[in-house]
Image (cartoon, rainbow, N blue to C red):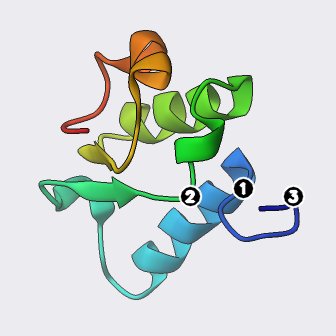
Amino acid sequence: MDASAPGFTLDEYLRCVDLYDRVGIDLTLEKVVGLGSICRRQNTKEAVRIVESLSAMGTGLGGFDFKITGLRRVAHLPYSS
């Protein structure tokens, strides 16, 4: 994955949330919102920022393929992993 790929930075994840909102889908009303493309970067500061920010917005995050190293830093935030 490279920095130009969608879903790499916090701003790109926030842009995605905005795109859902524009078509009438409020992700905060969904029980679980899958958080993809983060498993290989789960122990990085940017990944932690992404999880913290999306969680603070009220989304029920599902961290697909999130491993123990990343969960140690944000285990209290995702709905599931």
Q: Secondary structure at mark 3?
A: loop
Looking at the picture, tell me which residue is in the foreground, 27 or 35. 35
Residue 57 lies in quadrant:
top left
- Element at label 2: loop
- Disc 1 versus disc 2: distance between alpha carbons? 7 Å
Query: On the image, numbered disc 1 is attached to which residue?
Result: 8
Count residues near mark 2 (Cα–Cα under 10 Å), then give few for <14, some for 14-19, many for 20+.
some
Of label 1 and label 2, which has the lower sequence position?
A: 1
Pointer 1 and pointer 3: residues touching (CB < 8 Å)?
A: yes
Q: Nearer the viewer, residue 53 or 36?
A: 36
Q: Which mark is residue 30?
A: none
The amino acid pointed to by label 1 is Phe
Q: Secondary structure at mark 1?
A: loop
Percent of width and height locating residue 70: 49, 23
- Left or right of 7 on screen, residue 38: left
Cβ–Cβ under 8 Å for marks 3 and 2: no
**Residue identifier under label 2:** 37
Between marks 1 and 3, how big is the CA–CA gap? 6 Å
Judged from this view, the residue extending furthest toward the bottom is 23
Residue type at the position of mark 2: Ser
**What whole-number distance in Å separates the C-alpha atoms at marks 3 and 2?**
12 Å
Residue 62, compared with residue 21, is above or below; it is above
Q: Residue furthest left?
A: 31
The part of the image, by quadrant, that contains residue 3 is: bottom right
Q: Residue furthest top?
A: 72
Residue 5 sits in which quadrant? bottom right
Q: Describe residue 51's horizontal placement relative to residue 48 as left or right.
A: left
Dot 1 or dot 3, earlier in sequence: 3
User: Residue flagged by tag 3: what amino acid is it?
Assistant: Ala
Question: How many C-alpha atoms fall within 10 Å of the one at disc 3: few (<14), some, or many (≥20)?
Answer: few
